[in-house]
Image: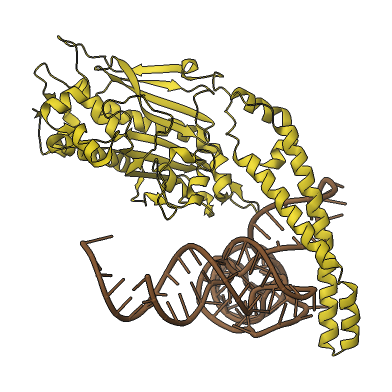
Amino acid sequence: MYDIKWIRDNTEAFDEGLGKRGIEPASAALVVLDVRRRELQTELQDVQKQRNTSAKAIGGAKAKGDEEAAQTLMAEVAGLKARYQQLEDEEREAVSALDRELAALPNRPADGVPVGTDEADNVELRTWGEIPTFSAPPKQHFELGEALGLMDFERAAKLSGARFVVLSGALARMERALGTFMLDMHTTESDYTEIAPPVLVREEAAFGTGNLPKFAEDLFRTTDDFWLIPTAEMPLTNLVGGEIVDAASLPYRFTACTPCFRAEAGSAGRDTRGMIRQHQFTKVELVSIAHPDQSEDEHDRMTACAEAVLQRLELPYRVLLLSTGDMGFSARKTYDLEVWLPGQDTYREISSCSNCGDFQARRMNARFRPDGERQTQFVHTLNGSGLAVGRTLVAVMENYQNADGSITVPTALRPYMGGLERIG
RNA sequence: GGAGAGGUGGCAGAGUGGUUGAAUGCGCUGGUUUCGAAAACCAGUGGGCGUGUAAGCGUCUCGGGAGUUCGAAUCUCCCCCUCUCCGCCA
């Protein structure tokens, strides 16, 4: 969400930001709405002032018992009411018209973000790890999993339809082990506080992170109007919604391992096989609530925390700086981590770390008070996967597969799997 | 799910239609006093928006929204949340 006052004073910069995302200039139309809004507000306040003055005079007259004077005054202001209500309606409509427009605009890309139209314009920043070689062509995770009898898509379809999976035995345990392993890393090594949040949230929370109103079709909604979280970013970031936190307590660092639910509307036909794109998956999320001066550093730190998981599991990956064409709605800058998948012979996204600046904070009214200052300021919010557990399972299976179809358990994970060294 | 009671400033807690943005207490900030501190005393102490170079002025805000009224913390309706009892339940 933008500050209309900022748009007013920075029309060129604002339109330039939109342009980088391939959106037409909007400042002129917004300024018109804003001028109208302020005119109506000023007018409304004039009438309110009159109303308050006369109401007090009537009150004063009645207090003195001067009923006659009160009646006279009341007759005088009789006409004011209709006008007041009309102005009130118009002003309300002007405000919501402006808010509707503002709420639908994506965040302004940070300086240095490559301008582009899609993922082809992303910039590879670095790679890590050796891409493994295999004596025979490596299998995809679902081939391995189904052959082991520990990954069942058919029965999942029986229960829930496409884009679900049933894991069993050692693979079910590995999924659980991965979540615990990641949480332990973030909480004991990187100062994140573990949170067990609701996975059903109300509309306000979904608005706060920027998923509503524009992306309702990507989300599941219950019959009594809860929204299933598509990521723990939603509950974790909204933790500070509507609050004014102490500057000294920043940054807040939250992590959670939750199921995530995505409708995957518009993804029909993509990644239909296997666990890459599911309606339900587990993810360990990292969220930071930071001082604006610290958010750039915090962004790098968070990305390093996500990378550390891949390094500990010895999974090769690369880091991308997303172009303006591939960035999410609320982000001003995003790093994607892509893990190497031998079965697919390609890198696939396993984490996305975004600095949203004050964009979400405005939507959810999350502020802090700088030391010794009167004025509050919006916090910066950051989120990143650390990591997507389902895709990490996929990556482990494909990278650690053996010629006989068994899977070696990564050393770092063995303590979390009762010492198990090999599956199958 | 049924019945009931509530939501007031950082906290506690008055206020049930009239100059109430809100008594009182606590907390906090500044000042006086003190060698210093405590105590005491004095003053200040929410957030948003509009207008203005600024000081200021205005307006909104007593869980959220809509309404009644010349006037709403106070009355009506809807929603949210908390608590108590019953039922159900992991």
Q: Quadrant of residue A14?
A: top right
Please indicate, yes or no, whether residue A313 appears anywhere in the rendered image: no
Answer with left or right where residue A374 lies relative to residue A193.
right
Q: Nearer the viewer, residue A223 or A109?
A: A223
Q: Quadrant of residue A20?
A: top right
Q: Residue at x 69, y 32 (%)?
A: A26
Chain B appears what colour? brown
Outermost residue, top side: A135
Please indicate, yes or no, whether residue A218 appears anywhere in the rendered image: yes
Residue A51 to residue A244: above or below: below
Q: Nearer the viewer, residue A2 or A303?
A: A2
Please name the colour scheme applied to the rendered image.
by chain
- The chain coloured yellow carries which letter? A
Q: Residue at x 58, y 34 (%)?
A: A107
Residue B34: x, y in percent? 63, 73
Residue A88 to residue B13: above or below: above
Q: Residue at x 50, y 19 (%)?
A: A118
- Count the marks: 0
Residue A24: x, y in percent? 66, 26
Q: Nearer the viewer, residue B38 or B84?
A: B84
Answer with left or right where residue A333 lies relative to residue B40.
left
Answer with left or right where residue A125 lies relative to residue A5.
left
Q: Residue at x 57, y 28 (%)?
A: A110
Q: Quadrant of the C terminus of chain A?
A: top left
Residue A416: x, y in percent? 17, 39
Q: Nearer the viewer, residue A264 or A412?
A: A264
Residue A270 to residue A385: above or below: above
Q: Quadrant of the N terminus of chain A?
A: top right
Residue A71: x, y in percent? 88, 82
